[in-house]
């Protein structure tokens, strides 16, 4: 289990999808945990944004819950929502489809 | 000196990873310790006689160790190489950061404080490894030093202040008159600068093989108003005269080099030290806690691309220093500040086995 200098012409690398080390008896679990952590991180990012947004709006004296429930996006706002939703799904499901050596 | 200023979403993502690593260092670590003890009680001490045997047993039987391993590798990987990772944040600010670094590089060279070696080829052990999972390593991109500086904030889970360990190390270095002090493997200069206050009359030098880090180091010394002679050199073979320094120090360098390089560096440090001069190093060696400590530390090495960390631990570094001509060499315990959790977060928790090496020529 000792490591060392890689063979000539090779590197010990890590990349965005380098799921090269396996930790679970079933390799499917390595991907499932990756998905779960990606999801959890995105939820945290989202909650941070939401807390900031609600804080800004509250300071301006806006009635936040009613405004949010009644909001109707226009076409460009809807396009931005769609793009963000697509990016989110890709980030959650990406580890399941990533190449594994 | 411009720091990385990621957007709010990236900061929230990085904060999530840092907090997750904090729970890993405490909750998961304690869970693995309990599983290790249970496995030893079940199978007898002979079954877990060394780190490799413990790895074989725990990786097959402990779900909590499996999660521990996954999180150790991938929280660090995600920190750098994910859509909200440090490299993406660097790319988002690349033009401005690159312009500032280019200007700093030009100023440092023009003022004679920064000596870069055009065409310099770093040792292969350095260029062939993405140490601590930094994609491309710390010399693969002109902005790698900026990325490394940002990443340092979460290298050690308990170290919210990445300079704390360097201040502690500097304070632990034996006092004495020093005319010239050299930091080998100086990186971005975090380990070099604290010596200016402790040895105000000394001239400071810093060498590293990574030009991106040296440019960043010059920015750091320039911002602090401290003159440091930075140069791009390998510590195995420098261009300094014999007996040039009174003190040579290194921080977290020795575990990043293979054994032949370690021996060569030790001989070179001995050559450039004046008689009576000291070689003081802070590094990871002799993990406490017997088989469990070694099992955790060698596992960290494997999971974090620290490919020479184990071989350094298995090297008699004090003997190697004596072989190089040092007449005295000792290893001393060092408190790296890992114990600075909140009051309700008592040990044990994961930590690096930091040790202080002091050798005298």
Image (spheres, helix red, strand yellow):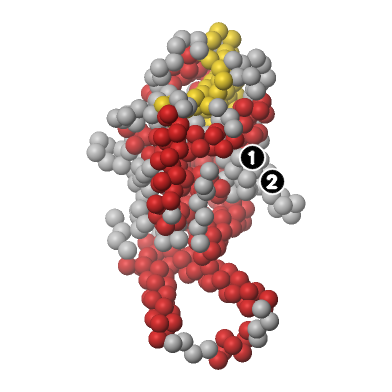
Q: How far from the left and from the top, in percent, is residue B262? A: 43, 24
Q: How far from the left and from the top, in percent, is residue A93? A: 38, 71
| The label number, if any, that marks residue B300 in the structure image | none
Check disc 2 and report its element: helix, strand or loop. Answer: loop
Tell me which residue sits at (54%, 60%) in the image: B11
Which chain hosts label 2? B
Callouts 2 and 1 in the same chain: yes
Q: How far from the left and from the top, in percent, is residue B167? A: 64, 34
Marks 2 and 1 in Cβ contact (< 8 Å): yes
Name the mark nearer the viewer: 2 or 1.
1
Point out the residue furthest to the right here.
B343
Q: Which quadrant holds the N terminus of chain A?
A: top left
User: Which residue is nearer to you in this view: A53 or B348?
Assistant: A53
Residue B156 in the image: above or below residue B7 = above
> Which residue does the numbered mark 2 point to in the structure image?
B340
Mark 2 or 1 closer to N-term?
Answer: 1
Is residue B299 visible from the viewing direction of this image? no
Check disc 1 and report its element: helix, strand or loop. Answer: helix
Tell me which residue sits at (45%, 33%) in the image: B107
Is residue B228 visible from the viewing direction of this image? yes
> Which residue does the numbered mark 1 point to in the structure image?
B164
In the displayed structure image, the side of residue B280 where residue A77 appears, left or right: left
Between the C-alphas of marks 2 and 1, the distance is 11 Å
In the displayed structure image, the side of residue B323 where residue B344 appears, left or right: right
Could you say which quadrant of the image residue B352 lies in?
top right
Residue B184 in the image: above or below residue B158 = above
């Amino acid at each position: 289990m000792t490591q060392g200098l890689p063979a000539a012409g090779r590197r010990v690398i890590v990349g965005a999808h380098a799921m090269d080390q396996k930790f679970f008896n079933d390799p499917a679990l390595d991907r499932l945990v990756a998905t779960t952590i990606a999801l959890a991180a995105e939820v945290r990012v989202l909650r941070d944004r939401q807390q900031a947004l609600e804080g800004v709006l509250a300071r301006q004296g806006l009635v936040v819950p009613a405004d949010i429930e009644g909001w109707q996006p226009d076409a460009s706002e809807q396009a931005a929502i769609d793009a963000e939703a697509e990016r989110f799904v890709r980030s959650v499901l990406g580890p399941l489809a990533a190449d594994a050596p | 000196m411009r720091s990385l200023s990621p957007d709010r979403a990236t900061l929230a993502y990085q904060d999530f990873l840092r907090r997750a690593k904090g729970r890993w260092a405490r909750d998961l670590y304690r869970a693995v310790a309990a599983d290790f003890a249970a496995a030893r009680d079940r199978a007898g001490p002979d079954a877990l006689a060394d780190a490799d045997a413990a790895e074989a047993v725990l990786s097959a039987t402990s779900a909590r160790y499996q999660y521990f391993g996954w999180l150790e590798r991938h929280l660090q990987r995600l920190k750098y190489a994910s859509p909200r990772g440090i490299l993406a944040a660097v790319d988002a600010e690349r033009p401005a950061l690159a312009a500032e670094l280019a200007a700093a590089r030009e100023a440092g060279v023009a003022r004679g404080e920064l000596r870069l070696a055009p065409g310099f080829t770093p040792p292969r052990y350095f260029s062939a490894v993405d140490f601590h999972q930094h994609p491309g390593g710390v010399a693969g991109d002109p902005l790698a030093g900026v990325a490394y500086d940002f990443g340092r904030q979460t290298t050690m889970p308990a170290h919210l202040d990445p300079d704390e360990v360097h201040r502690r190390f500097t304070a632990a270095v034996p006092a004495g008159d020093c005319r010239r002090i050299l930091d080998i493997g100086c990186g971005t200069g975090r380990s070099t600068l604290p010596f200016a206050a402790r040895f105000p009359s000394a001239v400071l030098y810093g060498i590293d093989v990574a030009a991106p880090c040296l440019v960043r180091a010059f920015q750091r010394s320039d911002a602090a108003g401290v003159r440091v002679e930075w140069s791009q050199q390998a510590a195995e073979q420098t261009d300094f005269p014999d007996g040039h320094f009174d003190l040579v120090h290194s921080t977290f360098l020795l575990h990043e080099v293979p054994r032949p390089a370690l021996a060569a560096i030790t001989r070179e440090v001995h050559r450039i030290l004046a008689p009576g001069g000291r070689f003081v190093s802070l590094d990871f060696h002799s993990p406490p806690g017997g088989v469990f400590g070694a099992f955790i530390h060698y596992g960290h090495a494997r999971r974090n691309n620290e490919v020479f960390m184990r071989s350094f631990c298995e090297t008699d570094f004090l003997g190697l220093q004596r072989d190089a001509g040092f007449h005295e060499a000792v290893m001393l315990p060092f408190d790296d500040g890992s114990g600075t959790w909140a009051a309700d977060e008592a040990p044990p928790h994961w930590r690096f086995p930091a040790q202080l090496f002091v050798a005298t020529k």
